[in-house]
Amino acid sequence: MIRLLNVYYPTRTVMLLLCEALIVASCFFAAAFLVLGPDVWLALNYEYGYLKIAALTFISINFSYYFDLFEPQLVSAREAIYFRILLVLAFDCFVVSAVLFFFPESSIGPGHVYGLGLALLTPVLILWRRAYDWIVSLKVFRERVYVLGAGDFARSVVDAIGSRGDLGMEVVDWQEVDLAEPGDRKKVWISELARIGQSANPVNRIIIAMERQRGELPVQELLNLRFKGIIVEDAGSLRERLSGKIQLDGLRPSSFLYAEGFRLRASQQFTRQILSTLAASFGLLMFAPIFPFVVLAVRLSSKGPIFFKQTRVGAGGRHFEVVKFRTMYTDAEAGGAKWATKNDPRVTKVGMFMRKTRIDEVPQLWNVLKGDMGFVGPRPERPEFIPMLSEHLPFYYMRHLIRPGLTGWAQVRYGYGATLAEAREKLEYDLYYIKHMTLGLDLLIMFETVKTILRRRGAQ
């Protein structure tokens, strides 16, 4: 896997994106040569042709990203992939037409280079995807993995690898071991590792997924295989890379003491707050023309105030009042505080639209300006739920080490949490963010937030 902005991506996915960008650019370069002939060098070198094709390639790759074409675990059916490719090309056509209508000088030469380029790109992209599926199915491009362990924990690792065909990993020779005595299990592991070491086709990686390692871990045998070039890896670090979250199962204080990351430097927090303030100021300025229409819509939707204020818990456990556009009826919590649910009957029709589009969150930019929140961070929770969550979820207090955020890693990767199990899942994403927090990761989260809003995911 390749690490970019403190997030791990399968090598196959990165290569797919780079090859697709090369294909898009090549098709438009080919169209320019076919249409312009000997004048192509003039158009490319003196009329910013290279820059125009690069911009169109960037736009096309972004559309592919927003339609999940680089996430095979979300879109696996071949027909669905082809349909989304056609959607991407349709959006490309719309953007090109709009740009040429308003800025005719953005054309590459006098001919129809963009039209021919899109015509070439359609069959080439579909053929490339079919070729890609065939290439990645070859065993020579698959990493052979052995999972050292048994029980539910080991099976969860095997299932996680099996469900992610984009990883290029294949679990081999794993089987359940049901022995009561630790000594008996260790003998089985020693025997299995000896067989792996003598195999004519050895594995490439061993993942240690043992629920109890003390007294059972065959250290010497693992060292022998490690010195033969076989990668030995702990299941916890693998699951963290695959899921983008830190699993709470088996998490101990030593996991924080000895692990890389969790560097909450004061200078970094100050820089993040400065950037959050600038982003919030820009957001409020851009939203200003729409503000009167939203106010009118909220006023007409139901009786009550325009804004909704609610106490939340921020950095260091400090309470503050978050501000939103009101999306519920005024008596929504007459029976006490509770989490929002899907298709919540307490939400007005206008409020449901604002929640789906995240318009109701815009006033929180004021909280960012005040310093109560950052632009990126864990979602601020209500104080009524904190005691219950702290009791049932280990290390929940760590969410309060930094300012909460308008958006965050848990929001773009998981969505809204309305149960204890979902709150646990979100905490695992929040811990990953706190561990790997950088300005680069913040920019990535902002970029993915746009995708989340456009695809209308995660809102309640």
Image: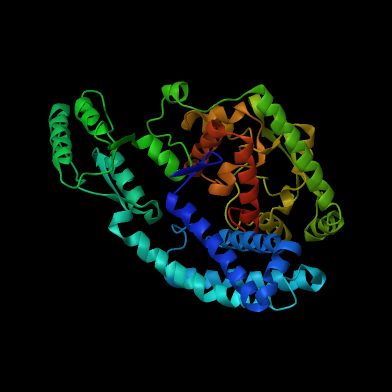
Give the left or right position of residue 287, taking residue 44 as reference. Answer: right
Relative to the observer, which residue lies in front, 413 or 105?
105
Determine the image quadrant of residue 233: top left
Residue 196 x/y as whole percent:
17, 40
Give the left or right position of residue 229, taking residue 332 as reference. Answer: left
Residue 280 x/y as whole percent:
77, 42
Give the left or right position of residue 51, taking residue 283 as reference. Answer: left
Q: Is residue 70 visible?
A: no
User: What residue is drawn where x is 63% and y is 57%?
Assistant: 345
Residue 309, placed above or below residue 99: above
Residue 381 x/y as whole percent:
62, 37
Q: Is residue 45 visible?
A: yes
Residue 97 x/y as whole percent:
73, 74
Residue at the limit of the structure toward the front, as seen here: 38
User: What residue is drawn where x is 78% and y is 45%?
Assistant: 363
Determine the image quadrant of residue 229: top left
User: How many numbered dots are placed on residues in this image?
Assistant: 0
Determine the image quadrant of residue 444: top right
Residue 63, placed above or below residue 392: below
